[in-house]
Amino acid sequence: METAKSYKTADILQKTIEPAIKELETRGWTISYEKEKTGRKISHITFIWRKP
């Protein structure tokens, strides 16, 4: 996912990822994510998808 360099991680999570997860959960998916850090910064986001 490409985002502008000016976006902060909290903005990406709050305005992009969390609304998408809520929408997919209404369709039966179970989705969670884990933030992985390198030093003090979040460097990766790992998604876990489950369809019951």
Image: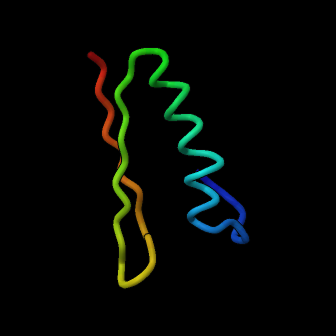
Q: Quadrant of residue 35?
A: bottom left
Q: Position of residue 21 (x, y in %)?
A: 49, 34
Residue appearing at x 57%, y 62% in the figure:
10
Residue appearing at x 41%, y 63% in the figure:
44
Q: Position of residue 40 (x, y in %)?
A: 41, 83
Q: Position of residue 41 (x, y in %)?
A: 45, 78
State whether residue 31 is above or below residue 8.
Answer: above
Position of 5 with respect to 37 (left or right) is: right
Residue appearing at x 64%, y 59% in the figure:
11
| Image quarter (top left, top right, bottom left or bottom right) of the C terminus | top left
Q: Position of residue 12 (x, y in %)?
A: 61, 56
State whether residue 7 is above or below residue 2.
Answer: below
Tell me, what colour scheme is on the image? Answer: rainbow
Position of 19 with respect to 40 (left or right) is: right
Residue appearing at x 41%, y 56% in the figure:
45
Q: Quadrant of residue 50?
A: top left
- Name the outermost residue toward the bottom: 39
Position of 20 with respect to 7 (left or right) is: left
State whether residue 8 is above or below residue 50.
Answer: below
**What is the total number of numbered labels drawn onto the structure image?**
0
